[in-house]
Image: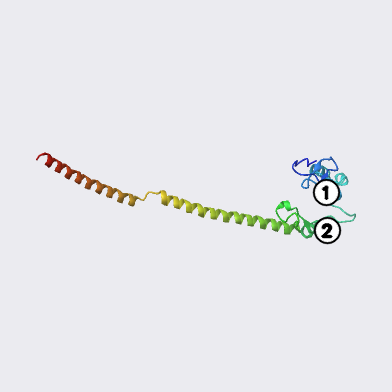
């Protein structure tokens, strides 16, 4: 049996919630359980105790004064200093060696990669513009009309015509003289 989403790929597991066959790309592992993406997403929910009392997001211990910055500071520290492993699908890292680092390091990598891609695209465009201009110049050189050259050719043809006309006139005069004899 092959993957339910990608029939050309071999299945490696079944979703423990819906039983759908999954390939390597579709399987999502949580602990030892394997889920398909829709079933995994369906498991995400807000803790019922927080829904019942949203103020518990602010007060995390009895006696904590209002405006205490301990929790936000902790979250900031986790976001900036925690070592995270990012998916190679982002274009940074590989399947065998995914990118691992802090969120800020990852964002710097993404921005750097985007900058390099933009620079490469700009360089490619400049190169293509040079080639295009060169080809247009060559085309114009080959197919363009040189007015001076054409005028010189026209004058040469005019002179040749006049010379031939004089030859024809001389031939006519000679024939007339011959016939009158």
Quadrant of residue 73 in the image?
bottom right
Residue 36 position within the rendered picture, expressed as x and y whole percent measured from the top left: 80, 43
Q: Residues within 10 Å of mark 1 (few under 14, many from 20)?
A: few
Q: Residue at x 48, y 54 (%)?
A: 134
Q: Residue at x 15, y 41 (%)?
A: 175
Q: Nearer the viewer, residue 101 or 156?
A: 156
**Looking at the image, is mark 1 or mark 2 earlier in the sequence?**
1
- Which of label 1 and label 2 is nearer to you? 1
Q: CA distance from mark 1 to mark 2?
A: 33 Å
Residue 26 position within the rendered picture, expressed as x and y whole percent measured from the top left: 78, 45
- The image's mark for residue 16 is none
Element carrying mark 2: helix
Does the residue at mark 1 contact the one at mark 2 (Cβ under 8 Å)? Answer: no
Q: Residue at x 28, y 47 (%)?
A: 157
Q: Can the viewer see residue 132?
A: yes
Image height check: is 63 above or below 7? below
Q: Residue at x 46, y 51 (%)?
A: 136
- Left or right, residue 33 beside residue 104: right
Colour setting: rainbow
Q: Residues within 10 Å of mark 2 (few under 14, many from 20)?
A: few
Q: Quadrant of the C terminus?
A: top left
> Label 1, on which residue?
29
Q: How many marks?
A: 2
> Label 2, on which residue?
70
Q: Nearer the viewer, residue 165 or 82?
A: 165
Residue 54 position within the rendered picture, expressed as x and y whole percent measured from the top left: 85, 47
Element carrying mark 1: strand
User: In the displayed image of the protein, which residue is found farthest to the right?
Assistant: 62
Q: Nearer the viewer, residue 74 or 94?
A: 94
């Amino acid at each position: 049996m092959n993957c339910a989403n990608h029939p050309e790929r071999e299945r490696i597991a079944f979703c423990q919630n819906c039983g759908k066959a999954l390939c390597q790309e579709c399987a999502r592992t949580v602990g030892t359980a394997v889920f398909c993406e829709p079933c995994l997403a369906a498991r995400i929910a807000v803790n019922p105790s927080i829904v019942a009392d949203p103020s518990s997001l602010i007060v995390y211990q009895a006696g904590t004064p209002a405006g205490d910055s301990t929790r936000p500071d902790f979250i900031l520290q986790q976001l900036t200093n925690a070592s995270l492993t990012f998916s190679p699908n982002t274009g940074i890292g590989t399947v065998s060696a995914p990118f691992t680092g802090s969120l800020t390091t990852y964002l710097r990598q993404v921005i750097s990669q985007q900058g390099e891609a933009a620079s490469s695209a700009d360089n490619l465009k400049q190169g293509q513009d040079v080639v295009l201009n060169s080809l247009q110049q060559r085309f114009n050189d080959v197919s363009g009309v040189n007015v001076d050259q054409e005028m010189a050719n026209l004058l040469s043809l005019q002179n040749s015509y006049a010379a031939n006309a004089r030859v024809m006139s001389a031939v006519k005069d000679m024939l007339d003289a011959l016939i009158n004899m």
